[in-house]
Image (spheres, rainbow, N blue to C red):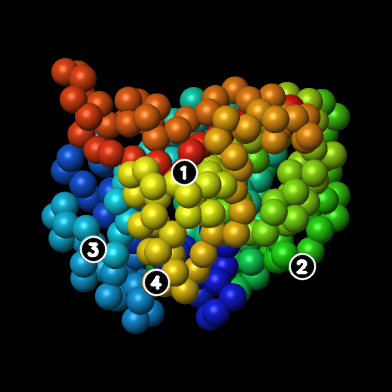
Amino acid sequence: MAKSTMSDFSPSAELICILRAKSYGEKRESYKTDDYISLLISHSLTSFFSMTQKSFLMPDDILSPQIPAGSYEFLISRIKYIDEFFQTRAHEFSHIFILGAGFDSRAIRFQNQLAQSRVYELDHPISQKDKILKLQELSIPSPSNLSYVPIDFNQQNLFSVLQEIPTPQGEKSLFILEGLTMYLPASTVDNIFSAIDIYAPAGSEIIFDYAYSDALAGKNTLYGAVEIIEGLKNIGEHWMSGIEKAQLQTYLNQYHINLLAELDANILEQRFFTNNHGKILGKVNKALAIAHGIK
């Protein structure tokens, strides 16, 4: 998650942590995820913003009116998609890079599956230090194969940082960019994808989510799109870049990435929020999508 430039913490990172914690406690099967670490961390969040959000968000299935329509469902879909990948396939990669890690806990939750991999969390130094301190306060040890790499994506060249992390010849890497690309300028996103293009061996994979360009331009009036732009403004953050609908593969071509899966709101609803009788139990925000690619 991109760090806010307005304070020493990221409201969106804290909000996502709280929503992850809420999802862990969900009794509705389609809404329940397994991020118990976020539940523990959420108790230690003490900013006025997080305390206010917790009072609205945590009880039962109540959502704060500040949460844009379908954004909770998108978050849950994103968690489930990446968690399922870590559960089944992440062990195939010798190096796993989690960019804009925020309060991500997969290196801890999936440490058995990742025992033969090196995991690197790359995030803003202030956000990263805050997370490390919270884990220490909670007596949650970081796995020995996890390294924290401080980086300001807007000020530093990602490739220069990656060069300090050599990968064995022919061994694949995995890149996770969760809740990151839309918070960065297009030039910074280009720098990140270009660095991955140069650094990652063939067969490496990338999973990221992104906003549609028309949502940033205010032209997307589908479910939740207008509300999510306004909701971000209300917490002092905003999206800065997006990708045009139906142009994802064209966009990825310049970085030599082939699309394995493109999951829009409709696909996510079918996959994660549809019961055995075909009834949709949750609607996903239509300003966002998930992409999964391979070099």
**Dot 4: within a 10 Å radius of its alpha carbon, few (fewer than 14), some, or many (20 or more) residues?**
few
Q: Is residue 167 above or below residue 216?
A: above
Q: Earlier in the sequence, mark 2 or mark 4?
A: 2
For the residues labelled 3 and 2, the Cα–Cα distance comes to: 35 Å
Q: Quadrant of residue 55?
A: bottom left
Q: Which percent across, then down, holds residue 128?
A: 58, 66
For the residues labelled 2 and 4, the Cα–Cα distance comes to: 26 Å
Residue for badge 2:
155
Residue farthest front in this picture: 219
Q: Earlier in the sequence, mark 3 or mark 2?
A: 3
Q: Nearer the viewer, mark 3 or mark 2?
A: 3
Tag 3 secondary structure: loop
Residue for badge 3:
65
Name the kind of residue labelled 4 in the image.
Asn
Residue 146 shows in this picture:
no
Q: Residue at x 78, y 25 (%)?
A: 202
Residue for badge 1:
288
Residue 10 shows in this picture:
yes
For the residues labelled 4 and 3, the Cα–Cα distance comes to: 12 Å
Disc number placed over residue 234 in the picture, else none: 4
Name the kind of residue labelled 1 in the image.
Leu
Q: Nearer the viewer, mark 2 or mark 4?
A: 4
Q: Earlier in the sequence, mark 3 or mark 1?
A: 3
For the residues labelled 3 and 1, the Cα–Cα distance comes to: 20 Å
Residue farthest left in this picture: 60
Residue farthest top in this picture: 277
